[in-house]
Amino acid sequence: MDCILFRHGIALEPEEWKGAEVQRPLTPKGAERVREGAAGLVQLGVEPTHILSSPLLRAFDTAKIIRDKLRTRLEILICEELVPDASPDKLLPLLAGLPDDACVICVGHEPHLGEAAGVLLFGRPAAGLSLKKAGACCIRFEGPPKAGQGMLRWWLAPSQLRSLGTT
C-alpha cells in the first residue's frame, strides 16, 4: 500500500473568516497551489484507488482539486480520522481496512498529518515532522499497514511538487 499524506492548501486566515471554522475556504492562491502540486503527483505517476479527506471545507476542496487533476472519478470519502485534533494513531485502522495494493491519498491538516506520519514510520508521533500547505509525503507498506512498519518513499515541499508539475 502507498499512503500519500497531503496537507490542504492555503486557506483564509481564521481572523479573516466570519463563518464556522469547518467552512473556512481555500484562498484563490491556495487553490492554484494545490492544482500545481497535484500536477506534480501526476508526474510522479500517482494513481489513487482511494481519496480520503477531513470534513473541513479547505481539505475537502483540496481533495476535489487533486481528484480532478489526476483525472479520476473516485468518490472522496470523508473521514473524522483526518480532522486536525484527531489522534494520529486513529488513521492506522482506517488504512488497515483497505486492500494491501491500495494507493490512498489522505488530505488533512497539521499537526495531525506529521504526527500520523510519525506513527506510520516510527510507531509513535515524532517531533519535527510536518507538511507545509499543499505539501505531501508517500509512505509505503509491504503487506497490511502497521505502526512503525511504513517506509518513506518521498517527502516533498509544495515548491518541489509544483516544480515536478511543470516538467
Image (cartoon, rainbow, N blue to C red):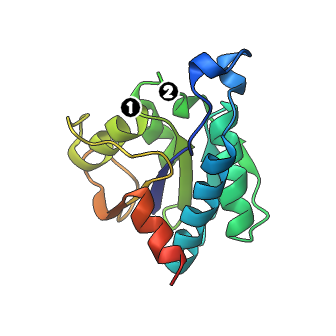
Which image quarter: residue 153? bottom left
Percent x, y for residue 96? 48, 47
Left/right placement of residue 153 relative to residue 94 reads left
Relative to 56, say whether 32 is above or below: below
Looking at the image, the residue that sits furthest to the bottom is 167
What x and y, as percent, mark residue 113?
A: 41, 39
Precedes in sequence: disc 2 or disc 1: 2
Task: Look at 50% across and 84% down and name the residue there.
Answer: 167
Q: Is residue 92 above or below residue 156?
A: above
Q: How many marks?
A: 2
Which element carries disc 2, helix, strand or loop? loop
User: In the rendered view, does 148 fall on the left or right side of 5?
Assistant: left
* Residue ID at (33%, 42%): 130
Identify residue type, mark 1: Pro
Please provide percent x and percent y for residue 75: 77, 53
Task: Name which residue lies at 53% across and 70% down.
Answer: 41
Instruction: Indicate which disc residue 111 carries.
Output: 1
Category of crowding for the residue at label 2, using alpha-carbon neighbours closer than 10 angstroms: few (below 14), some (14–19), many (at least 20): some
What is the C-alpha distance between the residues marked 2 and 1? 7 Å
Q: Position of residue 19 (x, y in %)?
A: 74, 16
Of the numbered discs in the image, which one, if any, rests on residue 135?
A: none
Look at the image and tell me whether residue 53 can be seen.
yes
Q: Which residue is the site of mark 2? A: 84
Tell me the amino acid under the disc marked 2. Answer: Pro
Residue situated in front as seen by the camera: 123 or 70: 70
User: Is disc 1 placed on a helix, strand or loop?
Assistant: loop
Circle 2/circle 1 CB separation < 8 Å: yes
Which residue is more in the foreground, 94 or 13? 13
